[in-house]
Image (cartoon, grey):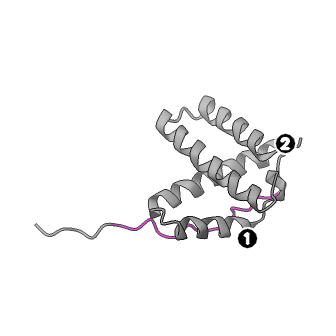
Amino acid sequence: MECDLDSAVDLFLGQVSTEKGLARNTLEAYGRDLRAFVEAMERLGRGRAADIERGDIVRYLDHLTRAGLAPSSRVRALSAVRGFFKYCLREGLASANPTREVRSGRKGRPIPKQL
């Protein structure tokens, strides 16, 4: 089965919505994260999930860092992309998972305040 990234994201979000029972806000955040990811991949000339490689994922995360996205937002974005590629593998839309072995970096913890 072959389809473009936009269609694959729609299918993934539909599946996650019905099977995982995610909260509406979480589902909307995943949708925003994945739409931004699709736009970035299309700028690189990647129109299908099967076209995306590990280096593309690393470049995308670097772009999010340079854009000033908070560490927690970068972790969420990578989580959405990881879930998307697991879905793509299951559905035969990709033959490899480019997010495998990609690390988002630490989420960062606030410094404890003394009493």
Question: Looking at this view, is 66 or 113 the one in front?
Answer: 66
Prevalent SS, magenta region: loop
Classify residue 88 as left or right of residue 32.
right
Query: What's the mark number on residue 70?
Result: none
Q: Residue 99, located in which quarter of the rendered image?
A: bottom right
- The x, y position of residue 105, in whole percent, is 52, 70
The N terminus lies in quadrant: top right
What residue do we see at 56% from left, 55% from top?
77
In the image, residue 23 lies at what x, y percent? Answer: 48, 34
93, above or below 71, in the image: above
Q: Tell me if label 1 and label 2 are in contact, CB under 8 Å.
A: no
Mark 1 — residue? Answer: 55
Residue 100 is left or right of residue 46, and the answer is left
Q: Position of residue 91 (x, y in %)?
A: 80, 42
Disc 1 is placed on an element classified as helix
Q: Is residue 58 left or right of residue 65?
A: right
Q: Which residue is mark 2?
A: 3
Q: Is 24 one of the magenta-colored residues?
A: no
**Given the image, on which type of amino acid does mark 1 rest?**
Gly
